[in-house]
Image (cartoon, rainbow, N blue to C red):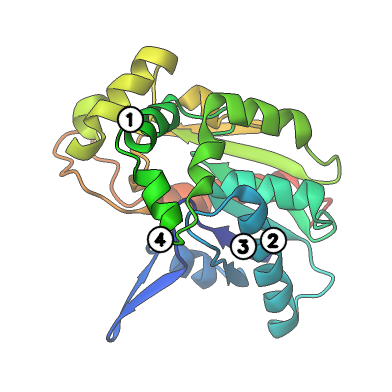
Amino acid sequence: MIPIILHHGLFGYDQLSLGRLKISYFHRIDRALAAAGHPLILSRVHPTAPIERRASELKKNILREINRQSLAGRKMLLIAHSMGGLDARYMIHRLGMAGHIAALLTISTPHHGSPYADWCLRHIGQRLRALRLFQQLGIDVRGIHQLTPRACHRFNEQIPNNPAVRYFSISAARPWHHVPPFAWYSHHLIQQAEGDNDGLVSVRSAQWGSHLATWPADHWHTVNKRFVLELKNPTGDITPHYLDAVQRIARQMDDVI
């Protein structure tokens, strides 16, 4: 079975431990992939740093686990959520990791940016000066600046796909009343600018390479963090969607993996 790397997004983590309780960023998804026989690597990078730093830390994570799990010479599938997809693309293109990665699957990644990032920088960064305060406290939050449509346009010009790697993407969308209340405003703002979205990233922005599907989920539900009670047409556990996507990619890449 192809080894799989799970890479988290902005404000992410690998696993949190509360006594005996362990909370994974990819809740239940990691266990299901491991149970299916995939050797698994969970990334852990700075939660809010720029793409360049996060990508460098991701590379170190992967190389360390390749040695620890004796995976040398095996091509891997890298699954990245949200901003993690930009880290992964940068790492593949700039940091010499294409030889290790057979395919990249991005989940709700803002490849073309998010209007909500613009709003946050304008209202939270400039008016409330919160980002400056974080910097004065030594907290690196420069990654947020790289998620605006303008910044992502520059990024896409500088970071093309590597021809040795296959690129796949999945978007997500829910009506505004099916996303968490704290995302109602961002959902409305993105809907006005770009159409259907998951509360943070539009379907249009999330498409990169071969677009496999649009999942009926909000941005947090795409990693099984559910903050809305689904009474009608529930999506439920998102794990089967991951297993299906991995199988679809594997069928397309028999000649590579």
Label 4: which secondary element = loop
Q: CA distance from mark 3 to mark 4?
A: 32 Å
Q: Nearer the viewer, mark 2 or mark 3?
A: 2
Q: Which residue is mark 2?
A: 56
**What type is the residue that disc 1 sits on?**
His
Residues under numbered marks 2 and 4 in contact, where contact means CB atoms less than 8 Å apart: no
The image quadrant where one finds the N terminus is bottom right
Question: Which mark is first along the chain, 1 or 2?
Answer: 2
Q: Nearer the viewer, mark 3 or mark 1?
A: 1
Q: Nearer the viewer, mark 2 or mark 4?
A: 4
Question: Which mark is first along the chain, 3 or 2?
Answer: 3
Residue 254 visible in the shown view = no
The label shown at residue 123 is 1
Q: Who's the residue at 33% across and 21% down the image?
A: 189
Q: CA distance from mark 1 to mark 4?
A: 20 Å
Label 1 Cα crowd, 10 Å radius (few <14 / some 14-19 / many 20+): few
Q: Nearer the viewer, residue 53 or 35?
A: 53
Based on the displayed image, in which of its 4 quarters is residue 100 positioned? bottom right
Residue 84 visible in the shown view = yes
Q: Which residue is mark 3?
A: 5
Q: Which residue is mark 4?
A: 137
Q: Nearer the viewer, mark 2 or mark 1?
A: 1
Seen in the picture, residue 75 relative to 162 is either above or below; the reply is below
Question: Which mark is first along the chain, 4 or 3?
Answer: 3
Q: Nearer the viewer, mark 1 or mark 4?
A: 4
Question: Which mark is first along the chain, 4 or 1?
Answer: 1
192 lies left or right of 212: left
Label 2 Cα crowd, 10 Å radius (few <14 / some 14-19 / many 20+): some
